[in-house]
Amino acid sequence: MIRWLKYAFTGAVLLLLSGCRTPSTATVHPAFYHWKTTFDPAPEARQLVRGLATERIYLRLFDVDWDENLKAPAPLAYLEPKQPLNTFEVEWVPTIFITNRSLTLLPVQDVPPFAEKLVSKVLELTETFNLSAVPEVQLDCDWTQSTREVYFRLLKICRERLSEQGIALSATIRLHQLRYPEQTGVPPVDRGMLMYYNMGEVRQWEEPNSILNPAAAAPYLQARPYALPLDLALPAFQWGVLFREGAMIRLLSGLSANDLSDPERFYDMKGGRYEVVQGTFLQGHYLYEGDLIRLETVTQEALHIAVEQLQRFEWPEKVYLTFYELDSAPELGLDAAALEAVIKAFEGE
């Protein structure tokens, strides 16, 4: 942890030296992502929504991946609400994750019918789940040069169809897309959501924290405005990164230090790193003796460093500051007071 803080502090100092920080003049509106398949927020999460005066929840409805049987992209992993959605007094933004593989295999001529089916399914589920006040739909995809033409055509058609219903369309923006718009293109949507996390070298054991690494992010931040109005997504989750024989083999979602507290199975190497000293099961996966785990989490202090970096960027007048993810935030001890402090820091207070 000391090593990570030193790394983060160095990144923050470099940023401050590289240019004058401009306090944000944006009006900030609190929001959350809900990304789990089952919608069943714990009481702590419901309290967080109320306590932060949350205005929006970006709700993952389903994923889209290539279906070999259909030879076409198809929805999967549909949301299963265990609580009535209309008991939350928020705006809902239906969100769809699309794999890049789907776009790679989708012929350009098949984009229009796929777009029609996608919008129809979103509107159908919006009605099924009784979602009121839907101002926007969001598509999440880390497109590449090879899939840009297909994805942008998909976005254009979806935007046209949604606008007929008075609904805007947004798309997620990664750091490399923010930094190099000439190469990656700017998606044809109404707004973008800057995903300010997963920025480090997750596959490298020496990485201090791949979820939130200010030093790694600094080169991607430009003082010039992006060609779309942007909202901002900050991380509020944790995971373990599992290594075997020097290679990263999987992420262990939601892993905490408490899960690794048994000294008979895990040796605490300090700094959020552990060695498996006895073969064991963890989250349904078998771990072998000698496997290594890097535990990565997000603290309020790390979020403050992040928003100090982001203040130098030119933001629109209205920004939805969105924490990913609703169910995970309380598990990290990020309550309404902690997140409100982060928002105020972003506002320059």
Image (cartoon, rainbow, N blue to C red):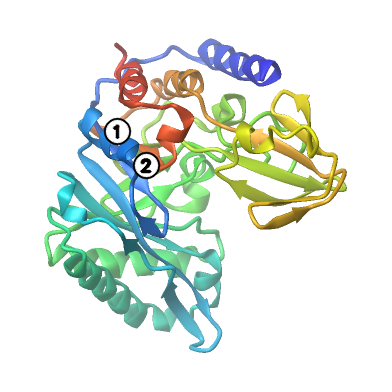
Q: Nearer the viewer, residue 326 or 30?
A: 326
Q: Residue at x 55, y 26 (%)?
A: 218
Q: Residue at x 60, y 41 (%)?
A: 255
Residue 138 x, y percent position in the rendering: 32, 55
In the rendered image of this protein, does residue 203 appear above or below residue 266? below
Q: Quadrant of residue 61?
A: bottom left
In the rendered image of this protein, does residue 205 appear above or below residue 24? below
Residue 36 x, y percent position in the rendering: 42, 54
In the rendered image of this protein, does residue 40 appear above or below residue 150? above
Left or right of 90 in this view: 227 = right
Residue 123 x, y percent position in the rendering: 21, 69
- Looking at the rendered image, the quarter that the C terminus falls into is top left
Quick one: label 1, few (<14), some, or many (20+) residues within 10 Å? many
- Can you see residue 235? no
| Residue type at tag 2 | Leu
Residue 46 x, y percent position in the rendering: 27, 39
Q: Residue at x 35, y 25 (%)?
A: 339
- Can you see residue 255? yes
Query: Which element carries disc 2, helix, strand or loop?
Result: loop
Query: Which residue position is annotated with label 2?
Result: 326
Q: Nearer the viewer, residue 98 or 126?
A: 126
| Residue type at tag 1 | Leu
The circle drawn on residue 48 is: 1
* Cα distance in 3D space between marks 1 and 2: 8 Å
> Cβ–Cβ below 8 Å for labels 1 and 2?
yes
